Amino acid sequence: MSASGKDLRMRHLLHRDTGTCILFAASHGTSTATIFHELNQTADKVAAAIDGGADSVLISPPIGRLCAGILRERPHAGFVAKVSATAYESFRRETPIWSSEAAMVAGADGVGIMMQLIPENEEAVIRLVAEYGEECERLGMPYIVEAELPGAYQANAWMPDDQVSYLRRACRLAEELGADIIKTNWPGSADGFASIVAAVTKPVIVAGGPRIDDAQLLEIIDEAMRAGAIGASVGRNIFQSPDPVRATANIAAVVHNRTAVASVLAGGVR
């Protein structure tokens, strides 16, 4: 049951023709200390991202209910339920908010969790990620682990001295704890990213990160694909774009069609 269930649900998370992946991340209400005003219209952003070419969306089960009509109208798109939230205490602490079983009841095709390892919380985070990995295996739910740098999005947060070594370990640990897809940061070079991908056997998607220039984002995604990624998970660079449909379509051209970035930038796509 478990293996076949995962296989069947995984079809909803990947592009049906290429096996590549664009995961639209709109789960920032669970992970940022302040809420982006663009997410006042989360449902509209989800619709725009899917219409632009996103294969799946990362949102909490309550937001999934809010977007139920949108997802029903777009049955090709997968719903990955974010099941943890970040508590801002003396250091960032990830805490469970939904069980995998509750996510499945809510209609999710997969479960997503943040894994940021810092010296003060490693044991608790490893235990949390492992518990979800075991539960997802039992239920046949695809499991997406965001194995990311603690300081990737927040100023003054702890950062490792050697980001490539940290991400190699984090991604391998994510696989050891049951991840079926691993989301991780761009370390600044294709060689570094290739080294990270080489540490695992599960598919890797590159995180879009904070809002950056569209051309820079497409170049990073293209380089990550060349270095072994199967796609990208992008949030801010879509929902903060003045044209999220077009922003997603440009990403889809690079990820799904492997269109050269220069060609995408020259004319864009619709």
Image: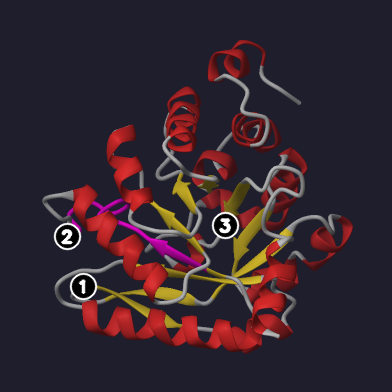
Q: In the image, what residue type sits under mark 3?
A: Ala
Residue 103, position in %: x, y? 64, 81
Crowding near the residue tagged with mark 3, few <14, some 14–19, many ≥20 C-alpha atoms within 10 Å: many
Disc 2 to disc 1, how far (Cα)? 9 Å
Labels 2 and 1 touching (C-beta < 8 A): yes
Q: Secondary structure at mark 1?
A: loop
Residue at 48% of width from left, 81% of height from top? 133
Residue 26: assigned label = 3
- Quadrant that contains the N terminus: bottom right
Whether label 1 touches label 3, CB < 8 Å? no
Q: Which residue is mark 2?
A: 158
Work out whether 231 lies above or below 7: above
Query: In the rendered image, which residue does mark 1 sit on?
Result: 91
Distance between the alpha carbons at the discs numbered 1 and 3: 23 Å
Secondary structure of residue under mark 2 = loop
Q: Which picture quadrant has residue 157?
A: bottom left
